[in-house]
Amino acid sequence: MAESVWRGRAPIWLRILTGILLFLAVWIAFNLGETVLFQSLESSTPPWLLLASGVPVGLASWAIVRKSSAPVAVALAVLALFVLGWFLHIVWLVAQCYQDGQPLLE
């Protein structure tokens, strides 16, 4: 009997794609949090901390998607794409403010 798509594991390509997208989304969010924390302490974020945060984020992404079903993998991929799109929109707005010479917070 064929296995149900709702209960079976997602294809390997979907799990890899979801893992990559989830890694990028969580890593960007984690690094933004670190940067805001260090800016509130009036110091700069050490570059080694930004790079070292990739290890736990990668392990978390792998643990989340390694046994996910296809619907869960698709939902996680869509969520990660939403977060990445939101981040790129913020970067675009900040670039527009710098280009126009306006302050970031009005």
Image (cartoon, grey):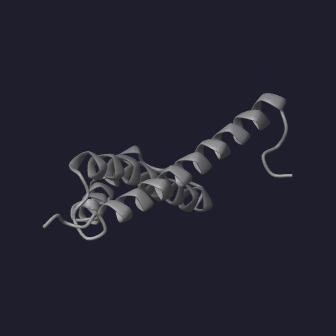
Q: At 23% across and 52% down in the image, what residue appears?
A: 11
Residue 43, horizontal then vertical, whole percent: 55, 53
In this rendering, position of residue 53 left or right of residue 28: left
* Quarter placement of the N terminus: bottom left
Residue found at the very far front of the displayed protein: 1
Residue found at the very far bottom of the displayed protein: 7
Q: Nearer the viewer, residue 28 or 12?
A: 12
Classify 44 as above or below 73.
Answer: above
Q: Nearer the viewer, residue 42 or 69?
A: 69
Q: Give the quadrant of residue 65.
A: bottom left
Residue found at the very far left of the displayed protein: 1
In this rendering, position of residue 66 left or right of residue 54: left
Residue 50, horizontal then vertical, whole percent: 40, 49
Classify 7 as above or below 34.
Answer: below
Residue 71, horizontal then vertical, whole percent: 37, 63
Q: At 83% across and 32% down in the image, what residue appears?
A: 101
Q: At 26% across and 71% down in the image, what residue appears?
A: 7
Residue 76, horizontal then vertical, whole percent: 42, 60
Q: Nearer the viewer, residue 78 or 29?
A: 78
Classify 104 as above or below 10.
Answer: above
Classify 6 as above or below 15.
Answer: below
- How many callouts does the rendering have? 0
Q: Give the quadrant of residue 9.
A: bottom left
Q: Give the quadrant of residue 58.
A: bottom left
Q: At 83% across and 30% down in the image, what residue appears?
A: 100
